[in-house]
Image (tube, rainbow, N blue to C red):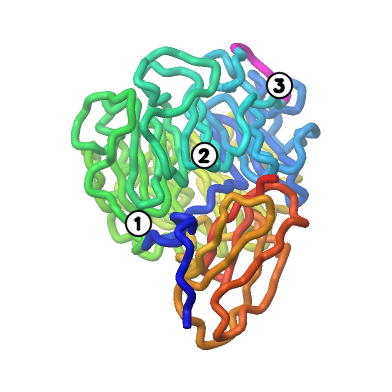
Amino acid sequence: MKKILPILFTLFAFIGLSNVINAQTISGGVSHSLAICNDNTVKAWGNNFEGALGDGTNTSSNTPVSISSLTGITTVNAGDYHSLALKNDGTVWVWGNGYSGQFGNGFYGLSNIPVQVTPLTGITAIAGGGAHSLFLKNDGTVWASGYNNKGQLGDGTTAITATAAPVLSLTNVIAISAGVYHSVALKSDGTVWAWGANDYGGQLGNGSSLNSSVPVQTSFLTGITAISCGAYHTLALKNDGTVWAWGYNQYGALGNGTVTASNVPLQATSLTGMTAVSAGGYFSLTLKNDGTVWAFGVNAFGQIGNGTIVDSSTPVQTNLLTGVTAISGGWQHSIAIKNDGTEWAWGNNNNGQLGIGTTVNSSVPSQVTGLCQMIIGVNEITEQLQVSVYPNPSEGIFQLSLLKPSIESIQLKVTDILGRIVYSRELLSGIDEYTLDLSHLQNGIYLIHNNNLSAQKIIIQK
């Protein structure tokens, strides 16, 4: 007979929707790109005039260069002209343009090497916007710093701050994203909350055009599993594999067949079976469960990747790409990782942000040259694992309980955020509760799986 479950179980076990994996192994900014290698080091390429590549120089590069001071990195994210990296110890490191205080450590200025965001610890996700940064803590709160002219820091003011401060009245957050002047958070109940600019077509999605310096709920949306901010539009992925979008739409970035802005979410046309979304400047990328990429919006530089430079207000398939496991949209360029660990890029390349050894644009995916081997990783969106894990975070000892009786043995495995197996065991039929001793692992984010589709995030923090 199944035992009564303790009340300390993590909220993730009870929500009827997919978990969100916060790690991002590739990211595109306005004119630079970032990637994590399989040894958890970081490569960067593109525009480096303000130090966004973090290699100690201000020399741009059309092929990847190493950021030698960074190790143990699990997530990268590119703002417009600054870069962020999350370490497996929960600390955040930033570099590039910090003139608006987006470094979050009290600094105003430029840095061409990574500097730590102090005193923030216990961070599980990061997001860089136009000139502001967001940080998600392991207690479900969001912290922000930087430019705040539209209220994008969510602190109830429009004052710039160089020291990370909490976003007001926001808890139980599991994912974050930042646009040029707006910010978005996904809560564990599947609802979306947004703050900042709302005057570019309604990118907050709450049915108005008024800016907000505090989080407001996006209308109508439930069951959301992923979010992504473009310049002035926002994307959301539902647990049924459909994509919803709102905000600025002059070039068709909402994917609904029109170029009319919307201040409430609208469903993108003909997209089903989607597993990830990523919003670029004025365009959108989506990843399907068959490993293909579908895109829509502005295409002046070939950022949709369909071999043309013609905009599309409905989704079109990116040419030549199959077996894709991760996507990222920059300002005018796109990046993808394939299941063989290679990275591909297309779109604007005037600063070498495609990493293909030239500064020539490409309207079809081209392989990034000289890049380290990439980890295939895990799907960003996964089906709910039918177990409860507590306490979470933990110093390494977790209690695991099955939420449904098991009539056959289950092979359980634990992976790091990049998909490498670090622990495995068999769960026997008829036994509902287990102790998992993961104290030998270092601090960081891990995933518990019972098959290739289901996963649950756990955090080790000693």
Mark 2 or mark 3: which comes first in sequence? 3
Please report the residue visible at 51 percent of the width from the left and 87 percent of the height from the top. Answer: 407
Q: Looking at the picture, how far across and down is residue 247, in whole percent?
A: 29, 36
In this rendering, position of residue 211 left or right of residue 157:
left
Sequence-wise, the earlier of marks 2 and 1 is 1
Label 3 to label 1: alpha-carbon separation: 38 Å
Majority secondary structure in the magenta region: strand
* Residue under pointer 2: 333
Which numbered mark, 3 or 1, is in the foreground of this view?
Answer: 1
Of residues 278 and 394, the one drawn nearer to the viewer in this rendering: 394
Magenta span contains residue 41? no
Task: Find the magenta span and give its range.
Answer: 108-113
Q: Are marks 2 and 3 in contact (CB under 8 Å)?
A: no
Q: Quadrant of the C terminus?
A: top right
**Residue 451 position within the rendered picture, expressed as x and y whole percent measured from the top left:** 56, 73
Distance in Å between CA atoms under marks 2 and 3: 23 Å
How many residues crowd mark 1 within 10 Å: few (<14), some (14–19), many (20+)? many
Is residue 110 found inside the magenta-colored segment of the image?
yes
Does the image show residue 309?
no
